Amino acid sequence: MIHRRRLLQLLVAHAASWSLSRTAWSQSRFNQNPFTLGVASGSPTHDSVVLWTRLHSAKSSLLGLSEDLGHAAVPVRWELAHDEQFSRLVQSGQVLASSALAHSVHVEVAGLDADRWYFYRFMAGDFVSPVGRTRTVPKPDAVVVRLRLAYASCQKWEDGYFTAWRHMREENLDLVLFLGDYIYEYPALTSKVRVPTGGWVLTLDDYRQRYALYKGEADLQAMHAACPWLLTWDDHEVQNDYAGVHAGFSSAADPSVPSHFLARRAAAYQAWYEHMPVRASALTRGLAGLASGAELRIYSRLPYGQLASLYLLDGRQYKDPQACTNGGGRGSGKVKPGTCPAWNDAVRSLLGRAQERWLDGEFAKPHAQESGWNVLGQPTLFGQRDLKVGPGQTFWNDGWDGYAAARTRLTDALRQHAVANPVILGGDLHENWVGHVKADYADPNSVSLGVEFCGTSISSRSGGNAKTAERLAENPHFVFAEAQRKGYGVVEFTPTQLTTTLRVVDDVTRQDTKIETLARFTVQAGRPVVERV
């Protein structure tokens, strides 16, 4: 068991180390390229960024570790430069890639210039990684004229190819905001486009192998190398429909044991950390803490000059169980609120009370009223969506509709603190939904507090458009919906307006699929109205 302080010393000190012995360095030899999972960067600030890679050759063992590496710690050199040829080095150093973290590397580079692009790479033995491109964000008080980011979610390997990432590389982005379901934890149950290896994902070794499968995709690797990412998660990084410390439900074929869920969650959280460019401080009590139920904190706020505040929210780790699932079972379902006494229970929370208090506290600070845009990145649809056409209501209980009191607390906080220009970005549905954030969704004439863009999936299947028009008419606070096409959204922020472009591929089952614009919308600063252009 590793104490939190010792783990953080291990991670941060190794990331800053410049003095590993040349003997250890010279003895590192590999039969194959160990950088098969690519490189990535993330968690940027105005003066720092996290650089990531994981050593893993084409030959992998049953433990998800490279056969060339085994359980040895491996020295890895890194370089950060102003130019792609690395003729103008900014910083360099060496770290140890430990088998305890699947030979992953998280280098936290500090002391950088604000609002600047950099290039980085890693070296191990005689091999050099692909070159990545990253950036710092502007200082909090800087005047910024533009931010261009993409939001995306839900990349199910067996449902289609990751070609959307290839097209995203051409979008000239500052940041990528990933909103959950980076992997899926079960075998190919519904689609035969391609079948993932490994079957059901239950153990740390299983999760490591599934991440290695996904990260082996060239288009995903290339997008990770193009710019820094901000990341949150949803359920499939652990188990379908799980809620906080409560197991979810995939299917009757799921071999998992609910009483073992906390151990499974700890393994999944560790594997997520190992494969994402996030800071060591996210491990609030180290690896041992995960095993005992400690949080892996990923919610945060990132100021982007005076132009925007980006809030990254965690919609799974602290969530209360879903209410009134059919038959009293685990996981999600469709519910008629009138038949569910717990539906409006004010105690129930999607974000958890600690995260709610943190967010309310952020909204109460001057930056929330003064910043141009307050952007909330979270995993799912925020606005109310009645699934029953005509009299009566039916809601899906796993999203914000199943936590109406918690949603009202968030909208009340937006109104109480006069938060400037709220924008909520989401995913999960595998459909595009665009609309207005209402103070009271039961009243069509209620004031609009902000706007919402819930994105489609990178590849995960959806039910199609048969009911989309009816559902759109049933929920007039939404102005656009489309439930078939796959892709991502691009939001460009300026001091006076935002422009959101929904980009979709022709056919996710084809590797040569093309990209096109499905729809484009604008929102003027100070006026929470979505307009299609």
Image: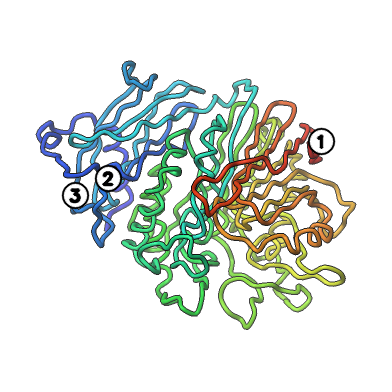
Residue 520 falls in image quadrant: top right
As drawn, the label of residue 69 is 3
Q: Is residue 144 left or right of residue 49?
A: right
Q: CA distance from mark 1 to mark 2?
A: 49 Å
Quarter where residue 64 is shown:
bottom left
Q: Where does residue 21 sit, x and y in percent of width and height? A: 13, 33
- Chain-order first, disc 3 or disc 1: 3
Residues 337 and 102: in front is 102
User: In what quadrant of the picture does the N terminus appear?
Assistant: bottom left
Helix, strand or loop for disc 2: loop
**Along the line of sight, the residue nearer the viewer: 78 or 471:** 471
Task: Find numbered disc 3 in the image and state the secondary structure of the residue it sits on.
Answer: loop
Q: Amino acid at mark 2?
A: Leu
Q: Nearer the viewer, mark 3 or mark 1?
A: 3
Question: Residue at label 2?
Answer: 55
Question: Cα distance, mark 3 to mark 2?
Answer: 8 Å
Q: List x then y, in percent, for residue 435.
A: 76, 48
